[in-house]
DNA sequence: TTAAAATTTGAAAACGTTTTCATATATACC
DNA sequence: GGTATATATGAAAACGTTTTCAAATTTTAA
């Protein structure tokens, strides 16, 4: 089929450059001193014959795959997308290549994807979110350099890269309070039965703390659970309305649910921000183009992805990774009005 | 670092099962008949020792990488995302693994990504969109099984998988006409200097043909160029307004620009759909949650990705790929009003 | 100069599979 | 039952690198 039969190997280079294969390998990987003259001859031969090393032979012999496994939960979501893009960028000039797998929020799929990645002998692993318990992750970390993005794991702080969700939510809620809102609803999320989406959990905590710090007792009737998807934002607002408790603002745990909420409000003829104010979390690309443009806690997904890539590279090279703590930054647009 | 030193090889299996390595290989790949007794012994040994074959040794020996290269242009865009997800699904039970690269709409990056993919000795290649000229693609196709998604290449019809963009745009425009609109603006796109985004080009053609079929002459003053991103939709509407030509509807070549257009109209206090109707193309996930929900030509990205995966698998196995022609389907929501 | 140390180099042994080839065994046919 | 054919099997040769080891050469130090 594929007629890549013109395969030229390291032997061809060796012959053409009048040196041994070992020497060719040495100049190519820069692994030992080689006389300038020979080095040049090799380089020239490589160039002339357009030689490209066989990656499988390399990996087999060296024991390194030169790949980084990336396990995510949801290819299509705007936030994960940003992370992936950041990883791609961070790996760009590194000889390492990412290979992706999607866990789809399903523990079985997730586990399967992990073993598939491990079978591919990845040199490092970046796990974005997910539902593995800490023990499982520790076992993985013992075998392979590992970075977990978007989770805060108490027992493995030197493997985690995450954003301060509490602070972001606190800030968002505080902003609503400062704008005069007192009855602030919250759309949170619970996936499955475990509270595995702990970032969302922290956002809720930040929301509640901000209320308390303002002397308000959080009203459970004002928080409702979605599943992070748009549609659940619609349902959440319906639920809120059905409960009959009044509210002048909604803080959604992510932009996608905020989007759904906004639609539900539109359908009911409730104006945003005139009647109800709306704040999201993530700052997904389309948030700036919502009607009205959404005020939301910006999560620097791309930089986080880049940092993850840098960190895993550091670990592979035996260095200690730099794991900055990221902060959410509230970007104020037009979905919040001042409450008199 | 990684203490995967517990490496058990095919030799260990052979020893434990009292057969030769060759036999182990044969039962594992099912490449030849093996006595039932030995087969069972091998399988049991594999199970007990939890053996996982070394993928690099396999690839080196067999000459197959068991990977499919996927070259896309824009990781984050909703449409590309759908395609990727479809590919992932289509490959799921196939033993093949996709490896992704992003061309970022930059010809040099694109080219570089391609050679990187080829260096990885992919068994097949799926190129989604992109700007390679046909000659270059033909050269690639001569070396490696190739499927091009989202482009219609006259000289290589048996490698292309695309949607009838003309038809989709025609239908969208016709719908606006049927709703009584006569002055219909269009937001198109031109990337770079070549009209390489030929799907967008065809959409424009469909738009113009629908107008002509309705006895209307397309007005160049009513079409404006963007770059497929949201922001350009904003700018496009500004431009349209500045030109002073009246219009009662806008057909945008993709949803992202429609989103931008919608924001620009909002800013100007122009109501959708009361004052101006809006139609998009793609049916990206958030289109249904726009305010108002967007009427748009649905592009079945996920099924297209799946079809691409199936097709490349067929080609790899020497079969003739099934390359269905996809049709866009107009999904009617609430962004179009009847013009009296 | 000469001995010791450092640097270059090539031969050959990994790395862990698949696959070819030849042999041994089982099955079919007359 | 004997030959011809098909089927199972193992030994050994790929696959294309990297890396170890030892030898050869050069440099350094005295």
Image (cartoon, coloured by chain):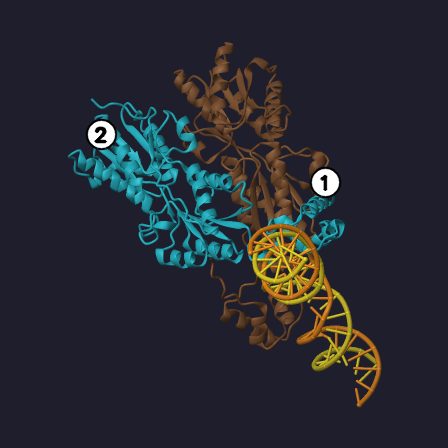
Chain colours: A brown, B cyan, C orange, D yellow
Residue at disc 2, secondary structure: helix
Q: For residue A3, say whether it is visible.
A: yes
Tell me the quarter of the picture where residue C24 sits.
Answer: bottom right
| Circle 1 chain | A
Q: Is residue C27 above or below residue A150?
A: below
| Circle 2 chain | B
| Image spot of residue B101 (x, y percent) | 49, 49
Residue nearest the observer in this picture, B328 or A75: B328
Mark number displayed over residue B313: none
Q: Residues within 10 Å of mark 1 (few under 14, many from 20)?
A: few
| Horizontal relation, residue B189 to residue A212: left or right | left
The answer to whether marks 2 and 1 sit on the same chain is no
Residue nearest the observer in this picture, A244 or B113: B113
Work out how far the residue at label 2 is from the one at label 1, CA to CA, in angstroms: 63 Å
Disc 2 and disc 1 in contact, CB within 8 angstroms: no
In the picture of the structure, the residue carrying the numbered disc 2 is: B177
| Horizontal relation, residue A115 to residue A4: left or right | right
| Image spot of residue C5 (x, y percent) | 79, 74
Q: For residue A163, say whether it is visible.
A: no
In the picture of the structure, the residue carrying the numbered disc 1 is: A139
Residue nearest the observer in this picture, B181 or A171: B181
């Amino acid at each position: 089929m594929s007629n890549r039969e013109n395969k030229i190997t390291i032997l061809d280079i060796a012959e053409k450059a009048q040196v041994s294969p070992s020497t060719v390998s040495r100049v190519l990987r820069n692994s030992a001193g080689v006389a300038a003259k020979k080095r040049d001859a090799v380089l020239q031969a490589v160039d002339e014959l357009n030689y490209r090393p066989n990656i499988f032979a390399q990996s087999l012999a060296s024991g390194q795959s030169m790949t980084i496994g990336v396990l995510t939960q949801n290819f299509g979501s705007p936030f994960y997308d940003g992370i992936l893009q950041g990883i791609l960028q961070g790996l760009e000039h590194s000889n390492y290549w990412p290979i992706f797998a999607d866990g789809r929020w399903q523990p079985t799929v997730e586990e399967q994807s992990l073993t598939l990645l491990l079978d591919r002998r990845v040199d490092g692993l970046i796990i974005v979110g997910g539902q593995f318990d800490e023990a499982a992750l520790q076992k993985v970390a013992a075998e392979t350099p590992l970075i977990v993005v978007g989770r805060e794991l108490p027992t493995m702080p030197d493997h985690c890269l995450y954003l301060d969700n509490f602070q972001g939510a606190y800030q968002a809620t505080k902003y609503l309070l400062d704008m005069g809102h007192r009855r602030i609803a919250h759309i949170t999320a619970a996936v499955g039965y475990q509270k595995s989406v702990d970032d969302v959990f922290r956002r809720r905590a930040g929301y509640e703390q901000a209320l308390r710090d303002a002397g308000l007792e959080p009203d459970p009737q004002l928080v409702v659970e979605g599943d992070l998807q748009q549609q659940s934002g619609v349902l959440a607002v319906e639920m809120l309305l059905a409960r009959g408790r009044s509210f002048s603002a909604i803080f959604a745990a992510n932009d996608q649910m905020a989007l759904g909420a906004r639609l539900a409000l539109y359908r009911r003829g409730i104006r945003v921000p005139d009647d109800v104010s709306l704040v999201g979390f993530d700052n997904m690309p389309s948030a700036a183009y919502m009607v009205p443009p959404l005020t939301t806690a910006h999560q620097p997904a791309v930089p986080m992805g880049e940092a993850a890539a840098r960190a895993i590279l550091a670990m592979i090279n035996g260095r200690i990774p730099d794991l900055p703590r990221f902060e959410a930054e509230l970007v104020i647009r037009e979905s919040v009005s001042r409450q008199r």
